[in-house]
Image (cartoon, helix red, strand yellow):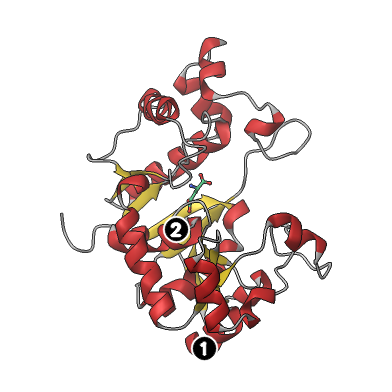
Amino acid sequence: MSPSQPIFRFAPSPNGLLHAGHAYSALFTDHWARALGGKMLVRIEDIDTARSREVFVEAILEDLAWLGLDWPAPVRRQSDHFDFYRAGAKRLVDAGLVYPCFCTRAEIRAAGTGETDPDGAPLYHGGCRAIGAPERAARIAAGAPHALRLDMREAIRRAGALEIAETMPTPRDAVKRRAADPGRWGDVIVVRKDTPTSYHLSVVLDDAHQGITHVTRGMDLHAATDIHVLLQALLGLAAPLYCHHALVRDAEQAKLAKSRGSQSLADLRAAGWSAADLRAHLGI
Ligand code: GLU
């Protein structure tokens, strides 16, 4: 492998079956990687051990093979690398960039400022930022469940102005830069209460560790990229190029989702669809 070979990834969470939106993302990623003489890795994002299921991991790999895709082994599974994420989180702790948050979701909603983050969740009011070191230590020693939140104001101050390099598989793969605005997320959680990392932290650490050059994913993660480039800057990690593709929508123009009862690839297969039919339907 030449050091400049582009490396893409498809990174599903095994908490359900893949639907046509996932298929589009995987096919789009693989197609572009091959066009650039690169490759697509598959990464299983199973940090949520309560919601991830082995049957879904198997089903996902089976669906991807059915789509005609292949990928290098071994497949990275995030649940095998919690120590790696703990070490990343420790760097943020040691740098004084995070603080423990003991609040429950209900408390955050109740104390809400009325402001929301780009995903529509109540913006954290920052209450636990003011808790003094002795009380923090005492509560942690007493076993109080807590998450670690990024002190966003301090993080932005240290990182300075950040840009995101975005690209599209246009004939020239032109790169455009936009200013990142991570502040609109408030003090995001970088280590959850229930697992020793978070989506944002593990995705950023893994993308760097795996040498990912192109992150391709749906527009639903467009705003999250602002957090990702901030974490990369704070942790001294290289930033990949980002491409957020349009989402596959259903007849009501809603984004496909398990919770909406969108048909899974297994459903489509059972209804007689071939992988070629699906590719044609998705325009790939
Ligand atoms: N695991 C995430 C998901 O299934 C995608 C992560 C990413 O592409 O950054 O939504």
Residue labelled 1 has its Cβ within 8 Å of some atom of ligand 1: no
Task: Name the residue rendered at 46%, 72% in the picture.
Answer: 231
Image quarter where the N terminus lies is bottom left
Which SS class for mark 1?
A: loop
Relative height, residue 183 to residue 257 (above, below) = below
Residue 44 horizontal/vertical position (percent): 39, 42
Q: Nearer the viewer, residue 133 or 119?
A: 133
249 relative to 33, above or below: above
Inspect the image, locate mark 1, and give the three-letter code of the amino acid beneath it: Gly
| Mark 1 or 2, closer to the camera | 2
Mark 2: secondary structure: loop
The residue that disc 1 covers is 160
Residue 81 or residue 20, whichever sits in front: 81
Task: Give the total of numbered labels.
Answer: 2
Give the residue displayed 57% in from the left and 62% down from the top: 224
Q: Position of residue 182 (x, y in %)?
A: 60, 74
* 278 and 190: which is toward the camera: 190
Q: Is residue 198 above or below residue 42?
A: below
Measuring from the top left, give residue 269's x and y in whole percent. 51, 15
Q: Earlier in the sequence, mark 1 or mark 2?
A: 1
Q: Are marks 1 and 2 in contact (CB under 8 Å)?
A: no
In this view of the protein, can residue 149 be seen by the observer?
no
The extreme left residue here reads: 1
In the drawing, does residue 211 fall left or right of residue 203? left
Q: Is residue 59 visible?
A: yes
Q: Residue at x 66, y 27 (%)?
A: 262
Q: Amino acid at mark 2?
A: Thr
**Can you give x and y, in whole percent of width and height, for residue 164 in the image?**
51, 72
User: Left or right: where does residue 226 sit relative to residue 262?
Assistant: left
The residue pinned by badge 2 equals 197
Rounded to the nearest angstrom, the CA distance separating label 1 from label 2 is 24 Å
